[in-house]
Amino acid sequence: MVLSLEDVKHILVVGGGAMGHGIAQACIIQGYKTTIMSRTDKTLKWAESQIRSGPFGLERLVKKEKITKAQAHEIMKLLTLTTDFTEPAKTADIVFESIPEDGDLKKKIFGELDPLVPSHTIIATNTSAIMITDLASAVTRPEQFIGTHWFYPSHVMPLVEVPRGALTSDETLDFIMKFLNKLNKKPVKVNDGPGFAMTRFIDNFVAEAIRLVELGIVGVKEFDDMCKYGLGWTVGVFEMLDTAGPLDAWFHSISYIHEVTGDSRYAPPVLGRKLLEAGYLCKPEVKPGSKGGWYDFFKVPRKG
């Protein structure tokens, strides 16, 4: 069965963290019944609070008069939370996986999902770097497996990078592009490879920025200032890492690219590992449990 847009009634999002809750929010805003599955009630409560009243949540949309309070209430009714995907997987038309960047863990989850989901279900992974063909080896219908690499905050940023695996069918690619358009996203097709296109580009310039700080050539704030006042960026590299890209996600993706390609440009700087092991991943409000980000580690005051 080839899935059509009209057939989509229920979406399962596996992972309720920084990216997963945003993917779910993008779906419920467009009227889709959506279930978030996470291993802990704590993560689910956090995800629900972010969707309801977080910095990009529904209450903010009400204040900005994008939706009414009554509409926000109806949108929240489309959301279900669970710590076990056994039942929701049985009726899922699309599964968006958004768990940590660990290939073995992802394949374990896909192996558990595969016998549960209907034969028409599309499984989409939000990996930022791991090859789709590799991850698809965990399922029995690799032609219905595809990558959807969202960008933080996932319900706000338009871009979704769409890498297809070696066995991904044209029908699956066509369907997911149309579905993402329906979510008001801007999907861009790319081919499979470690890091795809955007992650290889981003990881490379982030690594070089970290090396410059590591060498003592520039400080984090000074580098960010140059990005903003010289390149016209709205935020600098280290501000971006602190607010939009947890360090562990960057570190795992660049390490994976380096491992697979052997390209020395993707060897992670020692300073990045140092912050990772010290627990400084990003702002705690972005990733609960983090001690802070680059500005906190170097005790640099933030604006505002």
Image (cartoon, rainbow, N blue to C red):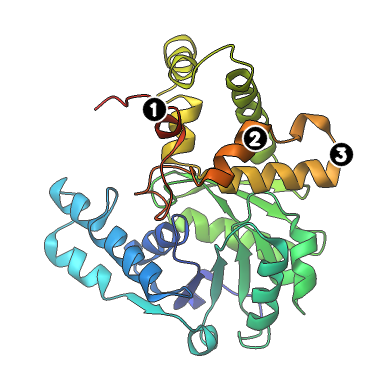
Q: Secondary structure at mark 1?
A: loop
| 79 in relation to 159, above or below | below
Q: Going by the image, does 137 lie left or right of 222? A: right
- Seen at 55% across and 39% down, the residue is 275
Please indicate, yes or no, whether residue 298 appears anywhere in the rendered image. Answer: yes
**Amino acid type of the residue that numbered disc 1 sits on in the rendered structure:** Lys
* Callout 3 amino acid: Gly
Query: Looking at the picture, how far across and down is residue 79, in whole percent?
Result: 33, 74
Q: Nearer the viewer, mark 1 or mark 2?
A: 1
Upstream in sequence: badge 1 or badge 2: 2
Question: Which quarter of the picture shows residue 59?
Answer: bottom left
Most foreground residue, 69 or 302: 302
Nearest to viewer (mark 3 / mark 1): 1
Q: What residue is shown with label 2?
A: 203
The numbered mark at residue 299 is 1
Q: Mark 3 = which residue? A: 262
Figure quadrant of residue 21: bottom left
| Separation of residues labelled 3 and 1 (CA atoms) | 35 Å
187 vs 77, nearest the viewer = 77
Contact between labelled residues 1 and 3, with CB atoms less than 8 Å apart: no
Task: Tell me the element at label 3.
Answer: loop
**Which amino acid type is shown beneath numbered disc 2?**
Asp
Q: Front-most of 147 and 295?
A: 295
Q: CA distance from mark 1 to mark 2?
A: 24 Å
* Residue at 63 percent of width and 70 percent of height: 123
Q: Nearer the viewer, residue 148 or 42?
A: 42
